[in-house]
Image: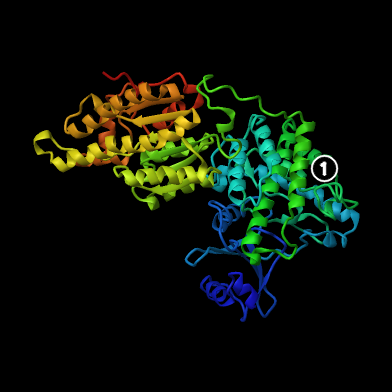
Amino acid sequence: MGDVVSLGADPAEVSAWMAALGIEFSEPLRLQRLGIGQSNLTFDVADQDGRRWVLRRPPLGRLLASAHDVAREARILSALERTPVPTPRVHGVKTDGAVPLVLMEFVDGLVIDRPIVAETLPPERRRATGLSMAETLGEIHAVDLDATGLTDLARHGSYAERQLNRWFVQWEKSKTRELPMLVTLTERLLAAIPVQHETTLVHGDFHLGNMIASPDDGRIRAVLDWELCTLGDPLADVGSLLAYWPESADALGVERSATAMPGFPRQDEMAAVYLAATGRDPGALAFWHALALWKIAIIGEGVLRRSKDDPRNRAAAGAPTVRQIDALVTEAAGIADAAGISPPPPARTPNEANEPPHKEKAVGRHKRTAIVTGGARGIGAAVARRLAADGMAVGVVDLDAEACADTVQAITADGGAALAVGADVTDETTTADAVRAVADAFGPPTVLVNNAGIIRDDLLFKMRVEDWDAVMNVHLRGAFLMTRAAQAHMVEAGFGRIVNLSSTSALGNRGQVNYSAAKAGLQGFTKTLALELGRYGVTANAIAPGFIETEMTAATAARMGMDFEEFKRAAASQITVGRTGRPDDIASAVAYLAGEEAGFVSGQVLYVAGGPTV
């Protein structure tokens, strides 16, 4: 029992929690490490009367952001209880301790996670289990996202790009050595991303070891380990199924493979059963097969890293070896070769479309690194999420790093890379430190969005000097300090995009003499940046939003003594398109100006105000 305590599963704590949940059991509880999984730690919980449950918790030691979220996994399992997908029932989620815990139903059956288990089954039982897996996968992809409340689990669309970016970031953070072959394969896959025609629930780790099969007829009784579940292209799961289904014992650098035994269906038969049941086009299946092998290799490297950092994370089956991980990458490259997935074309020179040299372009982990100030909420949060969705790693900067948690969590939950950074943009030291922190985490920042801002509204004769100075400092001094720190990285890279958030108030607005002056100043600042930095491949543009529904405009309504909804209706009546703006409207404009296709646009002020502005 002491061993499980050292693994972070205290029987006394579990007993108290189960009692609080109203679960009947006889003490003392017995906890035992369950399975050979290398990610979240799983325990068999049994009482003195033979009743059993399953406990899940994150692994020990240093964890990567967004990884091993057992509470999210419990949410998915709970949502699937009302669907045909076979899953264990969740009894409770504990989030008030040092780490989250999930208690779920114990489903009786066979987990065929080792060849020795498969050897106990006759060939016809093995075949039934394989074919049942293909049918079960179709049921997962048929889940109604709206009815289950899972439509917001992740962003819809761009799944392949998100997967490639997310997992290459994980590789960079967890690798134990350099592996150029994996980097090259990443480039090839990025250049060959297929069109995504639909978005469904995706398990993310669908393989034989994550199934509980009936010992009687071989059919699947429960699908386990939903840690990597997201929304995406359903063929990604089929690719994973094939990747985890070697047809020869030495295919992936392992001595023995359960799926290579007589009786288990072949890969092409598994795919055919799934495709016949769902009617989907198999055109992109080879891409997803290669990507799945690539991803499994990165997961294996993470397991190897965790087992080295803390041997207690090592499961009974041991950790993957370097030979096995390299074999996965080699197999993936071979599938890419057979599918005609070629290396990307050589990069153009810095003078072509304002692009940096090939050696400066990010490969795989993310397109570029961006910094967004004022990123904790409102326009800044929307911009950060959009740039991450477009494949950038994002440094989310605000006065308090903790205030950025929601933005960062939204990005990482969607497969992106983000870092919360606390910085006072008016302080020379903290701005330099913020830029350095983002560069250390993700690489040189070549996109900067100066969005940080405050309001201290009042009529001129009432305005205090300190309110004038505060607004000028945040908007102008802050933009100056952040830009000065970031531009060095852009100049060195031969590429940069600076977007400053101005406002229609730059044209004058009663009660905002300080704010109007600051926003007008940003327009002059932007045009001068364009003149000075253009020769280095750096563009600078400003966006001047009109009425946008944010906390800042709500504060303006309060200052005027108006209800915010009434305030919005009054504003919308004066806007050509008949509505007020939303943060995502501005994020879309920023996304264009921050993109590589905007290389011939610089020194401009784009008014995003729902109509002509005079």
Q: Residue, x 73% and y 44% (percent of image)?
A: 293
User: Which residue has dot 1 on it?
Assistant: 267
Q: Which quadrant is the N terminus positioned in?
A: bottom right
How far from the left and from the top, in percent, is residue 165? Answer: 59, 40
Tell me if residue 532 comes above or below residue 242 in the rendering.
above
Amino acid type at mark 1: Gln
Q: Residue, x 63% and y 63% (percent of image)?
A: 41
Q: Which quadrant is the C terminus positioned in?
A: top left
Res. 134 in view: no
> As drawn, is 129 to the left or to the right of 581?
right
How far from the left and from the top, in percent, is residue 516? Answer: 22, 30
Tell me if residue 280 comes above or below residue 149 in the rendering.
above
Q: Residue, x 74% and y 35% (percent of image)?
A: 285
> As drawn, is 158 to the left or to the right of 270?
left
Q: Nearer the viewer, residue 280 or 415?
A: 415
Res. 9 in view: yes
Tell me the quarter of the picture where residue 509 sits: top left
Q: Residue, x 54% and y 43% (percent of image)?
A: 414
Q: How many marks?
A: 1
> As drawn, is 278 to the left or to the right of 457?
right
Q: Residue furthest left?
A: 461
Tell me the quarter of the picture where residue 145 sits: top right
> As drawn, is 374 to the left or to the right of 218?
left
Q: Nearer the viewer, residue 114 or 76?
A: 114
How far from the left and from the top, in percent, is residue 333? Answer: 75, 37
